[in-house]
Structure formats: C-alpha cells, structure tokens
Amino acid sequence: MKIFTLKYEKNTARKSMQRMQEAAKGARHIKKDEMVCDSYETMNKLLSTARLDIFVAIVENRPESLYELAQLLHKDQSQVLKDAKMLESIGVIKLVSVMDGNREKTRPDPLYDKIVFEVAPKKIAKSA
C-alpha cells in the first residue's frame, strides 16, 4: 500500500535557517511521499473536503475519464478538473491523456492508495 503523508510541522524562522544551512551542505529534507505544511490553513487549502472526495472516488472507482468522475460525484466537470489538477500538482494523482476513438479524454490515475494527515504536538514536559 502506497501512502502519502501530509504533515503539520510548525516551522520557526530558526528552524528554516538551520534547514537551509544543512541543505547547502548536502543534507536532504525532502521526502518523496510526504509534504510538510506549517499551518492548518495550508493543509486545508491543499486537500479540501472536495479534493479528498475526488481522491477517494479515483482510488475506489478507477474512472476512465474526468467526465465519468464528475458523473460519479454529481459535480460540475470544470470544478472536478480544477481540483484534479491541484491533486496532480501535489503529486497524489496523475492525469493521463488517452484516445477514445477520435476523442481525447483525460483519465485520473491515483499514485497513492491512501492519504494520511500527521499532526504531532511537541511533548509536554512532565510537571513535578
């Protein structure tokens, strides 16, 4: 099972500078199957309820086209296309052009089986 993780991590200015210095020395902080956000608002903008519904429908139903996906979800095809392009831009699906006779259609293919949200608060110091 291939899992994509959307992780919340408070990113202080000091931490950002430290990571930039480490990157300059060759350290890698980018993980292939993970995206880190520094605010809950950003997480929600990237993967809104509508986009999560689209992702789930793609994984569960494997539609042959965006038109079929829009029909499954009872949504406007132009909005489904817009949300699907956002899902593609963050790397959780791929939009593939396929020929159907003389017509070209766009098939959404999932690149992951599951999306996980990770919010890990800092450990709370034990009180004495």
Image: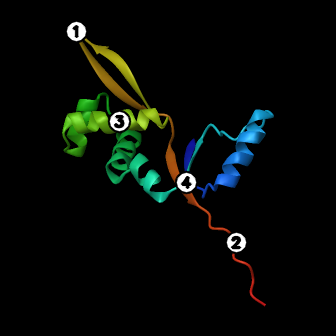
- In the image, what residue occupies the spot 39% across and 37% down? 86
* Foreground tag (3 vs 2): 2
83 or 61: nearer the viewer: 83
Amino acid residing under circle 3: Ala
Residue for badge 1: 102
Instruction: Kindly check if marks 4 and 3 are in contact, taking CB atoms under 8 A apart as contact.
Output: no
Q: Dot 4: few (<14), some (14–19), or many (≥20) neighbours within 10 Å?
A: few
Circle 1: element type: loop
2 or 119: nearer the viewer: 119
Residue for badge 2: 123
Amino acid residing under circle 4: Asp
Q: Residue furthest top?
A: 102
- In the image, what residue occupies the spot 72% across and 44% down? 19
Q: Dot 3: few (<14), some (14–19), or many (≥20) neighbours within 10 Å?
A: many
**As drawn, 78 above or below 54:** above
* Left or right of residue 120: residue 72: left
Q: Position of residue 97 (x, y in %)?
A: 35, 18
Circle 4: element type: loop
Q: Quadrant of the N terminus?
A: top right
Q: Position of residue 118 (x, y in %)?
A: 57, 57
Lower sequence index among marks 4 and 3: 4
Lower sequence index among marks 3 and 1: 3
Instruction: Kindly check if marks 4 and 2 are in contact, taking CB atoms under 8 A apart as contact.
Output: no
Residue for badge 3: 84
* Foreground tag (4 vs 2): 4
Q: Position of residue 120 (x, y in %)?
A: 62, 63
Lower sequence index among marks 4 and 2: 4
The answer to whether residue 63 of the structure is visible from this angle is yes
Image quadrant where residue 30 sits? top right
* Foreground tag (1 vs 4): 4
Residue for badge 4: 38
